Image (cartoon, coloured by chain):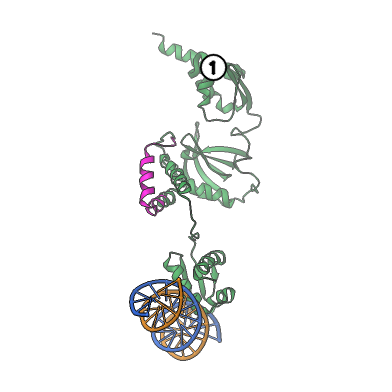
Chain colours: A green, B orange, C blue
Amino acid sequence: MSKAKRLMDLMMTVNRKRKFTVKELAREFSVSSRTILRDLQELSELGVPLYSEVGPHGGYRVLKERILPPIAFSEEEAIAIFFAVHALRHYSSLPFETESSSALSKFYYYMPQDIQDRIDQMKNRVDFVTPIRQINSPYLSILLDAAIQQKVLLIEYESREKRSNREIQPIGIYTRNGLWYCPAYCFQSDEVRVFRCDRIHSVVHSALKPMDLRHIHLENRGSDSPTGQEDVTLYAELTKEGVQLCEAEPWPVPKLHIRQDGTGWLEGSISKRDILFFAKFFIGLGNEATVTHPPELLECIKINLTELMAKYDC
DNA sequence: ACGCAGAGTGTGGGCCTTCT
DNA sequence: AGAAGGCCCACACTCTGCGT
């Protein structure tokens, strides 16, 4: 086996084992302990975070931050990865902010000059625009970690109505329209709810026993709206212009249906808590939308419009 | 193009020290 | 005692430059 191949194999072996002795590796690779020792020194110089402990029960260990073996990318693949990471710069918060920035710098630094020039030329010609938000979501990495490790968190959350403490078990995090959301099982309301990450003011680990939610993830968690007795069915007819305006909205429920002539309708189950939000939304659409259901929403629209009329009735 | 000598590199082994 | 690690030497192989 050539030295280069052995070093590659060794890098993968030490990443897998995490703890090992020189003798153990020497047996595995059929070389002398002295050769393995030299190889480990080379890996260490290449940046593999190794440390050794002498004495009985000693040996080598790999630190937490493992290094992946070198991967060869084609020019087009490298440029695609560069711009995928580059697109994240519009987000004011990321769960791996430092890492994405350092990865981008590394990627750019090790590119050949002609590829760097090509990237520089492309930088101002292609972009993935996301609304720039001033608000930060500082707990993204903790929420993501809790979702992966199945941990319960105690959060201080500011909803539209009030600020309260809740114990939640995150399912995952996702971003939409520049904002971060965390669907999570809420132990207080006994259901899966979606929390705006920028409205979470503090996070600590809770002593509560976690639920077994391993089967639930972002793809199969259901709609953003909690289901239950507090739901009502919304139906609204849309003109062609109304359809275009609704297409820009991020929520999956109520669902937008489009007819061949360009008109359409919104239909779906919404929470009664969101009636006021949708009332204001449909007032904003003016004549481009006609709400027929639910009666609570119609009533709320009327009240809001009456208040608006009174405000401007000089 | 071929052969040769010398330099460089990789590897193995032995011996010893240091450390726990 | 048992592990890493430094130092030294020997051997095999590869690479490079040079002469023919």
Query: Is A118 in the magenta?
Result: yes
Please tell me in which quadrant of the rendered image residue A270 appears: top right
Residue A151 seen? no
Judge by depth and name the residue closer to the eye, C6 or A113: A113
Residue A120 placement (x, y as % from top left): 36, 43
- Which residue appears farthest toward the top when viewing the image? A314
Residue C17 placement (x, y as % from top left): 34, 74
Amino acid at dot 1: Lys
Residue B4 placement (x, y as % from top left): 42, 83
B17 relative to A20, above or below: below
Residue A143 seen? yes
Q: Which residue is mark 1?
A: A240
Which image quarter is the N terminus of chain A in?
bottom right
* Helix, strand or loop for disc 1: helix
- Image point 57% across, 50% down: which residue? A148
- Image point 38% across, 44% down: which residue? A118
B12 relative to A60, above or below: below
Please tell me in which quadrant of the rendered image residue A28 appears: bottom right
Residue A122 placement (x, y as % from top left): 39, 40
Magenta segment, principal secondary structure? helix
Judge by depth and name the residue closer to the eye, A51 or A187: A51
Query: Is A303 in the magenta?
Result: no
- Image point 49% across, 13% down: which residue? A306
- Image point 54% across, 20% down: which residue? A243
Judge by depth and name the residue closer to the eye, B13 or A279: B13
Q: Which residues are magenta?
A: A104-129
